[in-house]
Image (cartoon, rainbow, N blue to C red):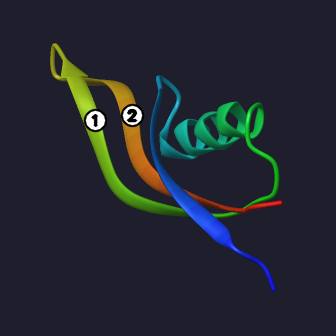
Amino acid sequence: MSIAKTIEVTASSKKGFEDAIKQGVAKAAESLDNITGAWVMDQSVKVNKGKLAEYSVRMKLTFVLK
């Protein structure tokens, strides 16, 4: 039997949504083992002078407890 836990993470990037997701998962993996999935719940952008300046994602990460 395995037990999993879910946490909510927010990450951002100046490159794009995909990069924000990758950075968020990578940072969480520094302190969490056994991450098995990510659900992107929300995406948003910051605009500066009419141009996209930053991409942000809010996601839930699932990891299996030892």
Mark 1 residue element: strand
- Position of residue 23 measured from the top left corner of the image (x, y, whole percent): 63, 33
Give the quarter of the image for residue 47: top left
The correct choice, above or below, for 5 with respect to 18 in the image is: below
Task: Give the label on residue 45, or none.
Answer: 1
Task: Judge from the rendering whether residue 29 lies leftward or rightward of residue 49; answer left or right.
Answer: right
Answer with the quarter of the image where residue 22 lies.
top right
Viewer-proximal residue among 51 and 37: 37
Query: Residue at coordinates 50% horizontally, 52% vertically from top-left?
Result: 7
Extreme-left residue of the structure:
49
Element class at badge 2: strand
Q: Which mark is residue 37?
A: none
Percent from the top left, x then y, of residue 10?
A: 42, 38
* Residue at (81% x, 57% y) in the render: 34
- Left/right of residue 1 with respect to residue 23 in the rendered view: right
Q: Which residue is mark 2?
A: 55
Q: Earlier in the sequence, mark 1 or mark 2?
A: 1
